[in-house]
Amino acid sequence: MEHASTTNTSHRLRQEIEDAIVAGQFLPGERLDEVQLATRFSVSRTPIREALHQLAMAGMVEIRPRRGAIVAMLTPQRLYEMFEVMSELESICGRLAARRISETEVCALQEAHRACEAVRGDLDAYYQANEVFHQAIYAASGNQFLAEQCLALQKRLRPYRRLQLRVRNRVQTSFSEHESILGAIVSGDSEAAGAALSAHVRVQGERFSDLVASLAQLGAA
């Protein structure tokens, strides 16, 4: 029970530290001192150390010899590039899923879509349901290596994908885009599925400007 409690605490701390990094409370290149973090969150250093390890695995921080955990440097250009790659990977998943999806996987994807609809009024709950929807597509691609790469990048971009949902009307737009993606996959239209997923994930133009502005607003707050 004690181990489970420590694990739950480290997961919670990972989320809180991750949110603080996105909000600009911890700046790129800044050292994350375990003692100071333990004091800040009123916990021991053990779950802090585990949370930092999780963040390092996700690419949010870097563990350096003699310096400890450092907030990873992520410029707007780097962020744009990562979303660009994510959109291409998910496009491939969509095309493959449209050709390979099984009846069981169709049901799982439809259920994930209904779950998104049920929580559209709750941003955090919608984001969690949204992750499940995308993961159902990864699984339906029938390509485990591709799914693993998508999951890794999804985790890396998690705070930024969650943040862009705060833009006005983005949740409703996201859900409508899910409708198109689902329809294309279920009907077996691989080109439409790929194009819809690419457009859904790619953050460019006004969407990218909104994301960068949201980051700046959080930092100022």
Image (spheres, rainbow, N blue to C red):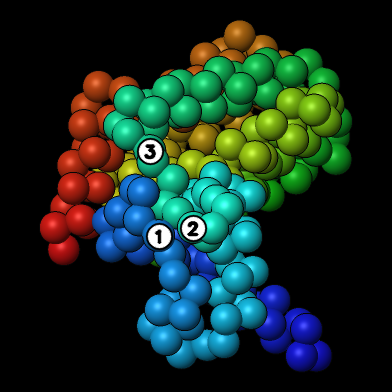
CA gap, disc 2 to disc 1?
7 Å
Mark 1–mark 3 distance (CA, rounded to whole Å): 15 Å
What residue is disc 1 on?
31
Q: Which residue has dot 3 on it?
A: 74
Res 66 label: none
Residue carrying label 2: 67
Residues at discs 2 and 1 in contact (Cβ within 8 Å): yes
Residue 166 seen in the current view:
yes
Instruction: Please give the name of the residue rendered at 44% of the width and 45% of the height, measured from the top-left corner.
Output: 72
- Residue 51: horizontal and vertical position, in percent? 58, 67
Mark in the foreground, 3 or 2: 2
Between discs 1 and 3, the one toward the N terminus = 1
User: What residue type is disc 2 on?
Assistant: Arg
Q: Tell me which residue sits at (57%, 81%) in the image.
A: 45
Looking at the image, residue 15 sits to the left or right of residue 184; the answer is left
- Label 2 crowd (10 A; few <14 / some 14-19 / many >=20): few
For image coordinates 83% across by 30% down, the residue present is 144
Disc 3 residue crowd, few under 14, some 14–19, many 20+, Cα 10 Å? some
Q: Earlier in the sequence, mark 3 or mark 2?
A: 2
Q: Residue furthest top?
A: 191
Q: State which quadrant residue 44 falls in.
A: bottom right
Callout 3: SS: loop
Q: At numbered mark 2, what does the secondary structure look like: helix, strand or loop?
A: loop
19 sits left or right of 99 in the view:
left
The foreground one among 48 and 182 is 48
Q: Nearer the viewer, mark 2 or mark 1?
A: 2
